Image: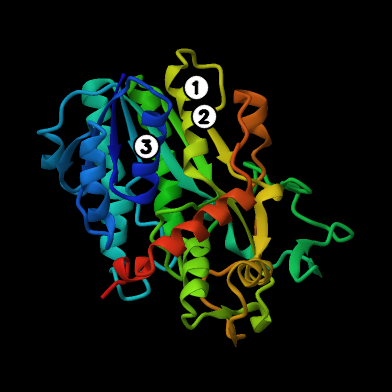
Amino acid sequence: MKILITGICGFVGSTLVKTWKELGNSHEIYGLDNFIRPGSETNRSALKKMGVRLFHGDIRLPSDFDVLPKVDYVIDAAANPSVLAGISGETSSRQLIEHNLGGTINMLEYCKLHKAGFLLLSTSRVYAINPLANLPLVVQNNSYVPNFSKELPGEISTEGISEGFSTQGPISLYGSTKLASEVLALEYGTAFDFPVWVNRCGVLAGAGQFGRAEQGIFSFWIHSWKKKNNIKYIGFGGKGHQVRDCLHPRDIVFLIEKQIAYQNNDKQRLINVSGGIKSSISLSSLSDWCENRFGKHTVASDPKPRKFDLPWVVLDSQKAKEIWDWEPKTTREQILAEIADHAEKKDNWLDLSAPF
């Protein structure tokens, strides 16, 4: 099968390719990347050695798709993944929308032209901010957990947030571009008769990710701790009780394989894909893990909340198990250890992804 991966030189795109090659898969892989993300250039030579044909182009430009060969599937891994994108000053709101939504339209038009399937790697940040920000929570072992003795939204269980949870705004500019992309992708697939799959991913993490404070938090925190950089707990009392789940992108390959091979129309097109409760951890507990690995380090505290931050986001991926017999193979401990091993080998890794 011929597959085009957009954003291929990023952490997720390059990990998908590496995993396929390790599995001995015979897919013919093409990649499109504009190398705008600091650090993405480092993956170019490795991908070429793996036989990937790379195209230097921008998904925001329709004409950049004109030179691409016909493929059977497009996997979108090209988004600007920061919830602060468009408001932090590093990118404008227009740039965010042009990239995350305009780029999706260009990919869908390409799929329409070539009758190629489309697989969107979406995000947990499409879920509504207000009900998540106001969840009744308790602190257990320095971590927030939902207070199940209180009334909770019906789509939250002990397994996490399910696909039926509200996507009513506000969900951030970033979240809204991804939600709009989901809707458009599903509509294009129906209108023009090509397969579309939408995978809402938890926090993707692993060695080789270019971590920043607002994205790639697991990589950022572990690398920062190893280097004894200044780090701080932001918001929620400044205690680091906020919780996220983590997922290694190589595990997504096993799901993607099943989705792109499926020929019928009887399966749900949109699902959560995450490490779930088992892979979730608070920032405070992550600090404990880092201390055990690298020794003590002081973490500052800033109780002032940051825009769009949420105290507890853990996705329930039970539907992925029920529909596709898929669940992650890489444990939280394996993900953290892999990042820590990488931090010991790459002392300047965070510098490569610095914005300026």
Residue 59 rendering spot, x and y as whole percentages: 22, 46
Is 293 positioned to the left or the right of 29 in the image? right
Q: Quadrant of residue 74?
A: top left
Single out the mark in the foreground, 2 or 3.
3
Is 200 positioned to the left or the right of 80 in the image? right
Element marked by disc 1: helix
Q: How crowded is the residue under tag 3: few (<14 C-alpha within 10 Å), some, or many (20+)?
A: some
Task: Give the residue at mark 2.
Answer: 255
Q: CA distance from mark 3 to mark 1?
A: 18 Å
Task: Give the residue at mark 3.
Answer: 18
Question: Going by the picture, which residue comes out furthest to the top?
Answer: 264
Q: Quadrant of residue 149?
A: bottom right
Q: Which residue sits at x=56%, y=21%?
A: 267
Q: CA distance from mark 2 to mark 3?
A: 15 Å
Is 75 positioned to the left or the right of 69 in the image? right
Q: Nearer the viewer, residue 297 or 313?
A: 297
Residue 306 rendering spot, x and y as whole percentages: 53, 77
Query: Quick check: 1 above or below 208?
Result: above
Q: CA distance from mark 2 to mark 1?
A: 5 Å
Q: Is residue 59 visible?
A: no
Residue 76 rendering spot, x and y as whole percentages: 35, 40
Residue type, mark 2 in image: Leu
Tag 2–tag 1 contact (CB < 8 Å) = yes
Task: Give the residue at mark 1.
Answer: 258
Q: How crowded is the residue under tag 1: few (<14 C-alpha within 10 Å), some, or many (20+)?
A: few
Residue 250 rendering spot, x and y as whole percentages: 47, 39
Label disc, if present, on residue 295 of the rendered structure: none
Q: Which residue sits at x=61%, y=29%?
A: 326
